[in-house]
Amino acid sequence: MTEAPPTINEAAAAILGELAPEELALLDPVAAGFFGSDSGRDRAVRTALEGRSGDDPVGFDLAGGAGLLAAFLLTVLNGVACDLLTAGVSGQARGWWERRRLRKRLSGAVAPQGSDTPLPQLSSTDAAEIGRLALQLALDSKVEPERAAGGQPHHRSADRAGEVKPDPFVLPSATSARFVLLMLTTTIGSIMVFSWIAGLFGGTFRGPVAAARVECVNDARRQVLGLDGAALTDGFTGCVNGAYRSAFGLVAAMVGVLLLVAVLAYATAPRFISREPLRALAEMPDSPAVRTAHEVLAASGQPVRVEVAILRVTAGARAFGRLGRYRIMLDAGLLAHGGRDPRVLRGVLSHELAHVRNRDIDITYLTLALWWGFLAVVVVPAVVYSAVEPAMLTQVSWRLALFLVVLWLTRTAVLRSREYYADVRAAQTAGDTGDVAAALQPRHGRPRRWTLGANHPTEAQRLAALDDHAVLFRLHPGEALGAGVLLGFAYPLMGFLLGTVWPDARLYVHDWILGLLLGTCAAAVVAGSAWRAVQRALADADARPRRRGPPRRR
């Protein structure tokens, strides 16, 4: 009697039992999401074939490697069951375009009986060729070579001895100071661009003020014979000031639109992030990794809802939410990795819990919302308006480009500093750096080629910050430069606008108001950095061994 061919689920369980037994508990929920959701299957196929999801601005991704072998196996076995991975396919999936077409076919096809679909009978030649293709896809997706070939993953020790260091949480964090600088840069940059569009700065720009000035001139000409010189001058001045005040109201309305777009983006971000199949950690099948996660949550004492993205093969996590209603999303690949190395799971989850305790989640998503809002509401209209008014290209484009550079660097500084603070907070809570350092150890995968504008520091930089907190106390020249550039643009611009709204005030009143407003903001940013640098210097002085012996004779 001929033995029935195995189903997709049976074949995947047999392979996992040999290569990754810690993932057997994850197979059923992963298979349910894979065959039950088109968008979930597309994500699983894409991440299985491409590896890590990139430099996620809000996520913790281990240093390379797809962590969930179950989703990768379901991708390959589903392709075999749908006759998409057949003889000759290995020669058709070598280039970028061919790989993309293969991914589209694999994500669009689903076996008729889901995970219970029997696998077709394959000849030994076809099976060997598909096996070679599966191995190559696994290596390309950054699965650890030892696991892809059936061996044990290489383990690296990450023990690091702790030492007494100054507490970086005594003073306000650099993340908050940089966020203040980001908000000021966004506001001043938008006011500058909108003022040009509204025609507040005159010149050849066609805007509301230009049309209003023409009407003021025409009114003065009609009344020139009926009024004396003083009344005519006062009337013309009042008319022009009224036009400028109307244009200023238009600028304020456009800035309000920018802030509204940013707030809406911030408010809808949790829904956007959680659009994929999620399962509460409490509903996951019992496994050593799930128990480890519950232990970390119980030790933290923070009432945070933790969910598992069952079709994310990457070994990462992210904290998200708004206004105190925070959630943590763990990749299923992280649970699989945590079954092999619990320290990695503890380190990543502790890091995400540290974001909640540091209260930087709202700052993070507002930072991203302000950046994308500035591009959509300020940069795009400026580019469109320059087609109508070419003078925008020569008089405004270089200013806008400078603001974009400062805004991008400030945005990146906010995202990078929060990672340093979360690492240190997680290590302080645990009492040592071992778990966090284990999560930051380099693994199989391509090294990052570009680090200057990356959302996260490199793993080496973060490991160095765990050993020595100097990066959290350093007086960063970029903050002083950003504050200086901001003041240089903001003072004359805000002085002009304040004179437009309040033309009857004495000049020194404008100066006092602007000096107090802008000076306080810039001083808060720079003084915060200086205070942290002094705190570090005093701690180093206390730790330095004192010189003994008789005093030196002069």
Image (cartoon, rainbow, N blue to C red):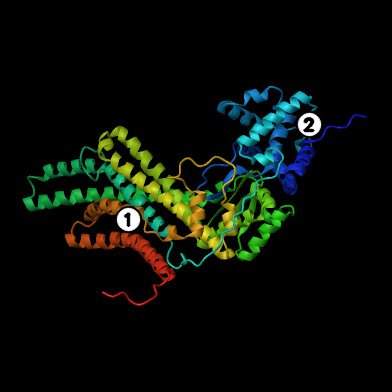
Instruction: State the residue lying farthest toward the right.
Output: 1
Instruction: Find disc 2 in the rendering and name its residue.
Output: 119
Look at the picture and state if 528 lies above or below 208.
below
Q: Residues within 10 Å of mark 1 (few under 14, many from 20)?
A: some
Look at the picture and state if 324 lies above or below 108.
below
Give how far across and how far down residue 64 sits, in percent: 58, 44
Residue at the image point whose x is 78% and y is 31% from the top:
119
Of tags 1 and 2, the one toward the viewer is 1
Residue 113 is labelled as none
Q: How many marks?
A: 2
Instruction: Find disc 1 in the rendering and name its residue.
Output: 480
Give how far across and how far down residue 100 sits, in percent: 58, 29
Q: Residues within 10 Å of mark 2 (few under 14, many from 20)?
A: many
Of 269 and 316, nearer the camera is 316
| Badge 2 amino acid | Leu
Res 149 quadrant in image = top right
Of 94 and 361, nearer the camera is 94
Q: Quadrant of the C terminus?
A: bottom left
- The disc, 1 or 2, on the residue closer to the chain's N-terminal end is 2
| Badge 1 amino acid | Ala
In the displayed structure image, the side of residue 151 where residue 94 appears, left or right: left
Give how far across and how far down residue 506 sits, in percent: 17, 61
Q: Is residue 252 in view from this perspective?
A: yes
Of 490 and 313, nearer the camera is 313
Q: Is residue 228 in view from this perspective?
A: no
- Element under disc 1: helix
In the displayed structure image, the side of residue 118 where residue 76 appears, left or right: left
Measured in 3D between alpha carbons, the distance from the residue under mark 1 to the one under mark 2, in whole angstroms, is 64 Å
